[in-house]
Structure formats: structure tokens, C-alpha cells
Image (spheres, grey):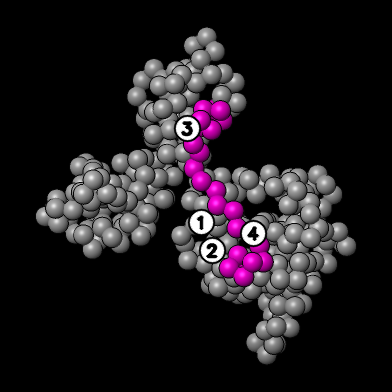
Amino acid sequence: MRELVLDPGCPGVVLAGAAGVGKTRLALECLGLAEGAGLVTVRVTASRSAAGLPFGAVAPLLPVDQASGSSAADRVVVLGRSAEALVAQAGGRRLVVLVDDAHLLDGGSATLIHQLAATNAAFLLVTLHAGEPAPDPVVALWKDGLLERIELAELTAKALEELLAAVLGGHLDRAAATLLAARSQGNVLFLRELVLGALEDGTLRDEGGIFRLVGPLAPSDRLVELVEGRLGAFDARERDLVELVSFGEPVGSAELGVLGDPALAESLERKAQLASGMSGRRLEVRLGHPLYG
């Protein structure tokens, strides 16, 4: 990543993956490398609340007249001036722009980011949730070959052990590592909250330089909030089905047909709240993540 960030001929990269795998953290580390090398850095954070506002995500970085635009102004002219205004702030140095959660960008901001990439006017660090719909200009960043797309996966069990050993300052008991890997499924955000909660309540203890679990893992308040936010708002039918799967997983297609709604299960699978797979010739439905239970 360091070579890519500091390469003046590279227009940027797209970091894609599931929520919590560390996309933003990696992008921030790259931003720090750029700052250390004397490059100018800015951060754009997209959000659902600003998605309906023209240039809502990049407005704080642009002069007022550029961000607001004019109803009579030609769209191409407004975009061109906005890009020039953003690059001008770097004062002749290479500009590095972190665009976090690019799948939530409004149309104007997405088009502006695409223009920066197409003209190599700045190095772009773009993060997005894999599987989420994104504006056409964002999809075109990797579809048209403007930026390299890098898929970030969950941590492997070995990587998880190495990470926790480095963070805790001691070795992790194999049984504890196995349980934490199973519960977090390699999701760095969930893993962090599981470990912090276990340290705070004394469930995870340092015993002579080896960290062991001395009791069952319990969800902290922070972890509960994270999971609730990930699950989103269910209607009554959706919650009933998710609770059914939670108590009975894996649920077969026959049981689901009698006790639940297969069409609703497909809808929840598209939202990553449920997951299905084959076990031999049997279709099984589980929760989208172990912590959802």
C-alpha cells in the first residue's frame, strides 16, 4: 500500500469489504503515510443523511459558491470548478483524498470524485461496503479500470492469534483464540469489542503471560449497540423469523416452509441478516453472523 500511495502515477485504490473488516482503519494508516511524506490530505465521509444533498459529502471542502452551485450553471462547469478548487487547496503538492463509505455518496460528490480519478488530479483512497449498491460514478472507478479494487477479507484464525498477541502483549490460550475466532468470524470490529468487553469484566485474564478465558463471553453494551445497528429496524415478521433461526439454526428448508416464510428469508439473506448453504443435499439457513444471536 505504501508504494501505491506514494506513486505519483497511481490515481488511487478502492478498499472493499464487509462492515468491520478494517477498511477505514487501513485507509487512515495510508493517510498517515501520505502526511508523513509531506502530501496534503483531506477526508470525505459519506452518510445517508447527506446522500440527498447535491455535493453534500464534499461541501465542507469546497468554497461556498462552488458547493452550492447555480440552477442555471452547466453541470460540467460546476464540476470542473469544484475539482479545481479542491486541488488548489493543496498548493501545488500532491493531494490525497480519503472517501469513506463511498457507496453512500450523493450524485454530485460521486461524479466529482470520479473526475478527480479520471484526471489523476489526486490520489484517492475509497472505501465501500461490498455488496451495497453504489452510485454509477463510484462503480465506474473500478469497472472502467481507473482505480484498483482491493477486497479485504475477514481475519484468518492464525492472523487473529497474531493480532491479539501483539495487542495484548502476551500469548493467547488456544481455546480462547478458537472461541473468539468463532464468535467474531474474523470481523476486526466485533473482535475488538469482544476482547475489550472480556478484559473489562475479567473474563479474559493474564495468567503468567498467557491470556485465558475464565468464564463465558458476554456481550458488552458497546457490542450490543453495534449489533443492533447492523441488524437495523425489523418489522414484526422479520424479527419473528430471525428469532426462529436464532433458536433453531441451522433451519432446513422444510422447517422454514412450515414455521417461517422462505420468501422473507431470501429478502433477509440479501440484507446479510441470514445466510444459507448446502449441507450434503440439505439446504440450511443460519444467522448472517454468530453474534446476531
Label 4 SS: strand
Label 3 SS: helix
Residue 225 coordinates in the image, percent (x, y) = 42, 44
Q: Is residue 51 above or below residue 20?
A: below
Q: Mark 3 belongs to which amino acid?
A: Ala
Q: Nearer the viewer, residue 236 or 162?
A: 162
Q: Nearer the viewer, residue 113 or 233?
A: 113
Front label number (3 vs 1): 3
Q: Which residue is mark 3?
A: 157
Q: Which mark is residue 103?
A: 2
Q: Which residue is mark 1?
A: 129
Q: CA distance from mark 3 to mark 1?
A: 22 Å
Q: Mark 1 belongs to which amino acid?
A: His
Q: Which residues are magenta?
A: 141-164
Q: CA distance from mark 2 to mark 4?
A: 16 Å
Residue 228 coordinates in the image, percent (x, y) = 38, 47
